Amino acid sequence: MKAKLLSSHIISLTFQSKSSKSAANTIQYVLHTSLLTLKMKFINAPLLLFAIILKPNNYGGVVVNAQKMIREKISNHNQNDNRRTTTTTNHDNRFFVKFKKPDESNNSTSTLMASPTGYRLQKDDPRLIMELPDDDIEVMTIETEDELRFWENLDNVEYVEADSKIYLQQGGESTPWGINKVKALGVSDANVYNQKVCIIDTGYDVNHPDLPSSVTGTSQISGESWKEDGYGHGTHVAGTIAAIGGNNKGVVGVNRNGQLKLHIVKVFNNNGDWTYTSDLIKAVESCVTAGSTVVNMSLGGGGFVRAEKEAYDRVYNQKGVLLVASSGNNGSSARSFPASYPAVISVGAIDQNNQKADFSQYNDQVDLCAPGVGVKSTVPGGGYRKYDGTSMSAPHVAGVAALVWSNFPDKSAQEIRDALESSAQDLGSPGRDDRYGHGLVRADLA
């Protein structure tokens, strides 16, 4: 075959034909080639008209009306859309074009722009976005239905489908395993507006999009507002208690409708440094003054202090405020305070398999256990992290206490505590034991 450019619009193809059968094959060849070039808007070239000239031989000269046959061929191709797996509703016009393996294509040399495996975009074509050679795929821009049909009808193309968008999953909302473990979602939080949980900790990120913004508070740290949490601990605790649900953000707390009242007392500075027992007593009294019904203390250490014991006895027995604290993280049987005072609910940690966390302190003062390993919750700056510790267990119990109490607002602090302990899911040895206390707190059973 010889080819020469006759003008900017016409190419002359000359074939040496040996038989009428060869002539027919030649016509079919040019026909398919002409079908390709009829779509020339797709390959950035003017419409090419082909004059087929068969040199005279024993069978004489042949002139073919190619244009008529091309139109018929296009009409037939446009009726065949069975290889399309999508439509051009793809707004970015990005498509996968999956090519057949060479031995699966029946005309691997059927076009002027053909490669050894059939027609493909050239590497410098602006419509070619990328190649996936291991999958025999070209990702390209296809802007019209005509172009889409062109690719679908190529013999070396297996299928065409839209290149869909993939998004990061950080915008979605997930329920931490601990919330499911304590069955918080099985209890209505419609009435939690009648409860207020006081969080004594490192502060609170009031601008976190997944936390309630109608919050009161006070700081006992000079020069640092309760609305800032440089250490992050208090914000994490708050998320377990009250992270907002149904907003397609982050996590869900035990009380998730955003109506639980919170009061924050900052007793640790932005470095998370220690504080005095007297500061803690003052903080608890501040919670009471603010009208809190439940106090969460994810903290501890030191030893028995009579003044502290008497203060908490008064708050619990006379003021009717429920006190919750973490049992401690050194993994021993040593008592940690304030958790080990009788007026305080001491909370140990378990993992997802209901096994006591190795760091969780255990002794005769442990009352309940709750999730404390790999607990995902809110952190300052609008983020989320997983923390370990009995500090993560205590807010599960504080949150459940407020949730249950909101449905029985006439009950006393003592009655709510009794309900939580008597309905706990028994773990470990039958009955109360030092490792799990009365068992796993269960909102649905209390």
Image (cartoon, grey):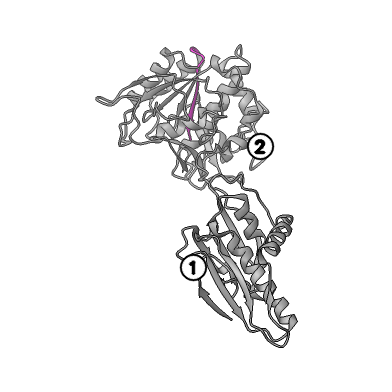
Of pointers 2 and 1, the one earlier in the residue sequence = 1
382 w.r.t. 411: above or below: below
Judged left or right of residue 280, residue 173 is right
Q: CA distance from mark 2 to mark 1?
A: 91 Å
Q: Which amino acid is tagged 1?
A: Ser
Residue at horizontal 68 percent and vertical 86 percent from the top: 57
Residue at horizontal 56 percent and vertical 41 percent from the top: 435
Q: Which residue is mark 1?
A: 7
Q: Which amino acid is tagged 2?
A: Asp
Judged left or right of residue 219, residue 108 is right
314 w.r.t. 17: above or below: above
- Element type where label 2 sits in the image: loop
438 w.r.t. 388: above or below: above
Boundaries of the magenta span: 318-327
Specify whether residue 90 is in view.
yes
Q: Nearer the viewer, mark 2 or mark 1?
A: 1
Quadrant into which the C terminus falls? top right
Residue 240, x across and y down, in percent: 51, 32
Q: Which residue is mark 2?
A: 426
Question: Does the stretch in magenta take in 323?
Answer: yes
Q: Nearer the viewer, residue 204 or 143?
A: 143
> Mark 2 and 1 residues: CB-CB less than 8 Å, in contact?
no
The answer to which image quadrant residue 405 occupies is top right
Residue 113, x across and y down, in percent: 55, 70
Judged left or right of residue 363, residue 429 is right
The answer to which image quadrant residue 147 occupies is bottom right
Q: Nearer the viewer, residue 221 or 158?
A: 158
Q: Nearer the viewer, residue 290 or 434?
A: 290
Residue 411, x across and y down, in percent: 61, 14
